[in-house]
Image (spheres, rainbow, N blue to C red):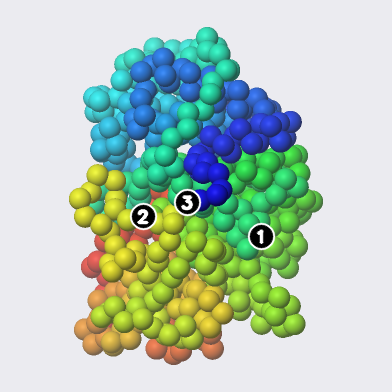
Amino acid sequence: MSSMMQRPLLISSLIEHAARNHGTTEIISRTVEGGAAFVLHRTTYGEACKRAKRLANALTRLGVANGDRIGALAWNGYRHFELYYGVSGMGAVMHTINPRLFPEQLAYIANHAEDKYIFFDLTFAPLIEALAAKAHGVKGFIAMADRACLEKAIPDSNIRNLLCYEELLATESCEYEWPQFDELTPSSLCYTSGTTGNPKGVLYTHRSTMLHTISGMSPEALNISARDVMLPVVPMFHVNAWGIPYMCTAAGAKLVFPGAALDGASIHTLFEQEKVTVSAGVPTVWLGLLTHVKSNNLKFSTLKETIIGGSACPPAMIESFERDYGVRVVHAWGMTEMSPIGTVCRLMAKHFALSPAEQFKVQIRQGRVLYGVEMKIVDGEGHELPHDGKAFGDLMVRGQWIVDRYFREEHSALRDGWFPTGDVANIDADGYMQITDRSKDVIKSGGEWISSIDLENIAVAHPAVQEAGVIGIAHPKWDERPLLVVVKKKDAEVTREELLKFFDGKIAKWWMPDDVVFVDQLPHTATGKLLKTKMREDFKDYTLPTAS
Ligand code: AMP
């Protein structure tokens, strides 16, 4: 018999804690209604908690019951933040939807999730109009704005059952007692941006979210404290912005939400104006930011650290942030199925005795597991491979915030109790993991594997290269050989031969791409990753010069 209190781990306890202990700490948002003008909305954790309670009262009045899914198509902003707490806190399920998915996928997701209501930022009104016609189960659509902005943005909308967020809240009380229920109750739902087939849902629980929050904010992981000002560039519609809105609330960190303006200039202005100390996002966003900062001779006055993940962070980017701007890059890896954080790359005490070049070799890896995640690599037969930094195999994970079964699927997604990530990796003796590829993307040449990520990382270190993607092209002798597809930087010039020469000495000879193709742009997924399936489709009839 336990002698300790048993209080369920509930998401509502986060906002309640922040309101009591960090009530005046600010939450800043660039709103979409602000239009082109640089208008920032300012609120606090204290106010946000009151409005989340009004929202919970409004949802109750609308007939939302425990377990009902509530969708949202929204940018990072204070109303989206209120939804995170109001919806999950009352016992319903917060279903964040990625607006960058194709319209058919949006309809599929809303129907599969059986969303009861869908909230949306005004920018997404056209998407909602199309969705409303296909998602018949949705009882109403709620524009996240006041009446004046709503009428201005969509004066003659034909969205059925259109409601106004501010009107809903205005008539409600800010008195609300958060219900206490089982911590295994579902809290939120995210769909993977599957590149093939329909997206799959991952249904998080209050318990999984809270454990991910507590471990994820620790110094070994994202290291978030009440001294920080965090600007999450990673969208709240992509795996709950990596859990950052929960971690900042637990820590009482000031939050800065960038809204829809994710270009380098807008982000940099916000960094400086709001004295941001830490940020997080995918490599493509930082590419835009670095280009802007470099070409305008700017600096970062307060930014100390940026967390980069979602795709492999090119070593050249880590180097540039640190060397040119004194900003530490923390490389992290995870996936929707993992809430999402799996590993974070931070140095151990012993590494400080190493030279900067040796430290850098550690920093470019995807990092070590945080407490709560276990990982291993296995060969094709499922046998575990050594952690020697060389052997690579299928990466398997298990832990308290990792999916077991996809939403509404009958069978477990696990293999012998482990979740197969679909990534191929090596792990060194200290537990630092490095992703070689998605298993579908490795290039199989003469029975050996070539890492497309390694080749891409080298290509983007060339000063004339903006972005690079490497895919395997069918080859009569070797099965597959690498093709390098490159987007050049604006006004930069480089030839095929110069680029190939750039690889000399950096890779084994047989890894050398067989050809280079220059394109204007590369295809991306809804979460900013290179869309290799589309690249392979685009180049399916391509004949390598070495093939004859
Ligand atoms: P998602 O579920 O959309 O977050 O995608 C998860 C996948 O993104 C992982 O399985 C990896 O293939 C990839 N990924 C995430 N972070 C990294 C990283 N730091 N390096 C390489 N790949 C990554």
Q: Position of residue 332 (x, y in %)?
A: 54, 62
Horizontally, residue 439 falls left or right of residue 511, namely: left
Q: Which mark is residue 403?
A: 2
Q: Mark 3: which amino acid?
A: Met
Q: Mark 2: which amino acid?
A: Val
> Which residue corresponds to mark 1?
219
Q: Mark 1: which amino acid?
A: Pro
SS label for mark 1: loop
> Which residue corresponds to mark 3?
1
Q: Earlier in the sequence, mark 2 or mark 3?
A: 3
Q: Which mark is residue 423?
A: none
For residue 349, above or below residue 130: below
Q: Position of residue 57 (x, y in %)?
A: 48, 18
Cα–Cα gap, marks 2 and 3: 30 Å
Between marks 2 and 3 in the image, the one whose residue lies nearer the viewer = 3
Inspect this view and state whether residue 324 appears.
yes
